[in-house]
Image (cartoon, rainbow, N blue to C red):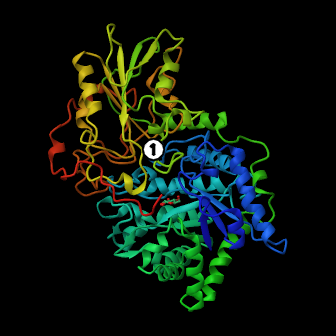
Amino acid sequence: MVQAEIANATPEEVAEFALGSILNGGGSFPGGDKHASVDDWRALADAYHDAVRRSTQSDRAVPILWGTDAVHGHSNVYGATVFPHNIGLGAARDGDLMEAIAVATAQEVAATGIDWTFAPTLAVARDDRWGRTYESYAEHPDVAVDYASRVVTGLQGVPGEAGFLGPGRILATGKHFLGEGHTTDGRDQGDVACTEETLRDLHARGHQAAIAAGVQTVMAAFNSWHGTKVHGHRYLLSDVLKGALGFDGFVVSDWDGFLQVAEDRAEATGRSVNAGVDMLMVGVEWRAAYHDLLQQVSTGAVSMARIDDAVRRILRVKARAGLFSRPRPSRRGAVEGPGVGDPVHRKLARRAVRRSLVLLKNDGVLPLRRDIRVLVAGDGADNIGKQCGGWTLTWQGTGNDNTDFPNGTSLFDGFVQATANHGGAATLSPDGEFAQDPPDVAIVVFGEDPYAEGDGDRDHLSYSALDSEPLAILRRLQERRIPTVSVFLTGRPMWVNPELNASNAFVVAWLPGTEGGGVADVLFRGPNGKLDHDFHGRLSFSWPRHAMHTPLNVGDTDYGPLFPYGFGLRYGDAAADRPGRFDESDSARGLPASDRPRTVGSAYPR
Ligand code: GLC
């Protein structure tokens, strides 16, 4: 019932204390080495597995279970394929694509000897100030409902069929249960004040679909509902999830989430287990959690019946995953088939990038010919870390540079590939300056710097209030009569009216991952001048009319977005019927005093 982090518990300690599970949190690697190889990951998985087997007298050792956040590919692992984050995949509206991505992700995770991913996130984000908006597929539950079954099936296989949780398959997690996307003001880990009907109809439907598809684990949410922390909410975690929804796998806490239930840590642990948490994900102090739980049982605060129920659920999942009979972790991947960073997976990821892009404006400058001279500006142009976003190698997705992605391509790399050998050229100029001969077109790639969880919470949605440089670049290029194409890297819709007005075309690329070349595939015509790839993406989040225009969701009574849910231009759409200029005065309306991103601070030391 105790899950420890690999940086805090050695294989010997895991065996000595008979811990049931380990995890690597974001930014945690074998030996603390960001560039740890696939063999290093496998060797560590074997080390935990072997230590547990050595420690027990019988040969019926209960196998260890390793969980990881493979939330957009196996994104903790050096060289892995990093797919677009969920907000971009939501714009693709493509369930087949989602299942294929899940299959590929499972193959890469299994290849490293790991059995379990903490995915899919089924959040329905309702206030875009939330730092986890990009982990949500859409503001409307329909996308989460459609995707939940496809992703769970891609990861696990189909219950009852031969391949279910077989080689190359891994356990999935429906997270976070329940209501995380509905906190007041979008504050991460905040309070949800909505009705039970809204919890049911907006936020639980994705989880129900995941359960119907056979999801084996559910992660409890950090938020509270009407002032009670979900980690201590028996009605939600037991009566609803395990009772009404019939979930028979196990509930894992979020990172030390059980400690938020009460002041006293032992009491908090007991109350969380009694509410329905079966496995305690412990950030650092796993020994304390171990002793706290024993103490709660010895005083009778937690009954043996509850312990038996939790352990039975965990053993049931381990048995279903075949862990009692499968070979050592290093040999669990599919015997043949693609491994970490396989070209087949990267090709799939590049297709996902293409299908996620949303075109908000185009006066005809797009599509581009390949024989032109392109100036590529902006701090996102040649920055794979920025295009991947949070949960990439490191927890926050920061501290990465292009050398950390041996298999990746930046957007600029894609533009070079699209023009070189076709009579054209792409030149990188981050500040947009150029000497004598002017370019035919300038592509300016800009957007949010990587973040995760509460560190990404904002007080408003104005982009230029966070970073005014891209607008300055765009305006300088406009003054010099250079047509501009903006490519916006973002984890959420933002107020960008000034940038829209300074662009001849405006593309939202969300957080596309390592296959940046997918952007060039759509912006440029094919080598033969034909249109190989049109835009496909449609907004899965409504676009704000001003910087405080949130919550803003399809179905609102006073719904009045700048671009509605489902919006997305195609090359064939006439530019003529688009509004010319967007109101640039709106950002001034009620911007909160602090125009810097709000950091509520992490829920736990990392
Ligand atoms: C984090 C996240 C959760 C993640 C877990 C392990 O706090 O809330 O989504 O799976 O910790 O990294």
Residue 373 screen position, x and y as percent: 41, 13
What residue is rendered at 72% in x and 45% in y?
A: 39
Residue 597 screen position, x and y as percent: 30, 50
List the residue tagged with mark 1: 398
* Residue 280 visible here: no
Above or below residue 292? Residue 423 is above
* Residue 284 visible here: yes
The quarter of the image holding the N terminus is bottom right
Above or below residue 131? Residue 16 is below
Amino acid at dot 1: Thr
Nearest the eye: 251 or 304 = 304
How busy is the neighbourhood of tag 1: few (under 14 within 10 Å), some, or many (20 plus)?
A: many
Residue 148 screen position, x and y as percent: 54, 56
Nearest the eye: 284 or 465 = 284
- Quarter of the image holding residue 510? top left
Q: Residue furthest bottom?
A: 300
Above or below residue 160? Residue 343 is above
Q: Is residue 458 left or right of residue 63?
A: left
The residue tagged with tag 1: helix, strand or loop? loop
